Amino acid sequence: IRRQRKREIVMGIKIDRIPVINVRHLDFDTSYELDTGGPDWCPYLKGERGFLLDLGKLCSPSTPQCLKNIREWLLANNFADLWIRLDPDAQEAIKLPVYQW
């Protein structure tokens, strides 16, 4: 996992890279809520195999601790933005809880 987001220019388009970590850094209830489209904790997109989250805009006092932990991890590791992708095939991040579900 890279420490900072890298930017590239490809065919005149700015490309940003963001960290990708395992979806099991989310607890089951949080993953289920994101999967069913119910929460308003942060802006996010649901994909076929995971989520893309903008943890820079946590907007609910009821935000789950697992999302707060991921946000703190992003800040502690100096990522340029607080966007993150969670994928079931990605590596687990060191120093983040992993939930067994």
Image (cartoon, helix red, strand yellow):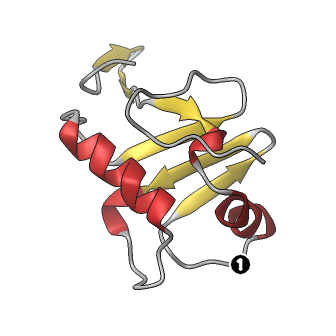
Q: Quadrant of residue 39?
A: bottom right
Is 58 on the left-hand or right-hand side of 91? left
Q: Give the x, y percent position of residue 59.
A: 39, 79
Observer-nearest residue: 58 or 66?
A: 66
Is 11 on the left-hand or right-hand side of 30? left
In this rendering, the answer to whether 78 lies above or below 81 is above
Amino acid type shown at disc 1: Gly
Observer-nearest residue: 85 or 95?
A: 95
Q: Which residue is mark 1?
A: 38
Residue that extends furthest to the bottom in the rendered view of this protein: 61
In this rendering, the answer to whether 54 lies above or below 80 is below
Q: Give the x, y percent position of residue 44.
A: 56, 60
In this rendering, the answer to whether 28 lies above or below 77 is below
Q: What residue is rendered at 40% in x and 14% in y?
A: 10
Q: What residue is rendered at 37% in x and 34% in y?
A: 95
Q: Look at the image and tell me in which quarter the N terminus lies.
A: top left
Q: SS of the residue at dot 1?
A: loop
Q: What residue is rendered at 50% in x and 70% in y?
A: 64
Q: How packed is label 1: few (under 14 Cα within 10 Å), some, or many (20 or more)?
A: few
Q: Give the x, y percent position of residue 15.
A: 39, 25
Q: Give the x, y percent position of residue 25.
A: 56, 44
Q: Quadrant of residue 4?
A: top left
Observer-nearest residue: 29 or 48?
A: 29
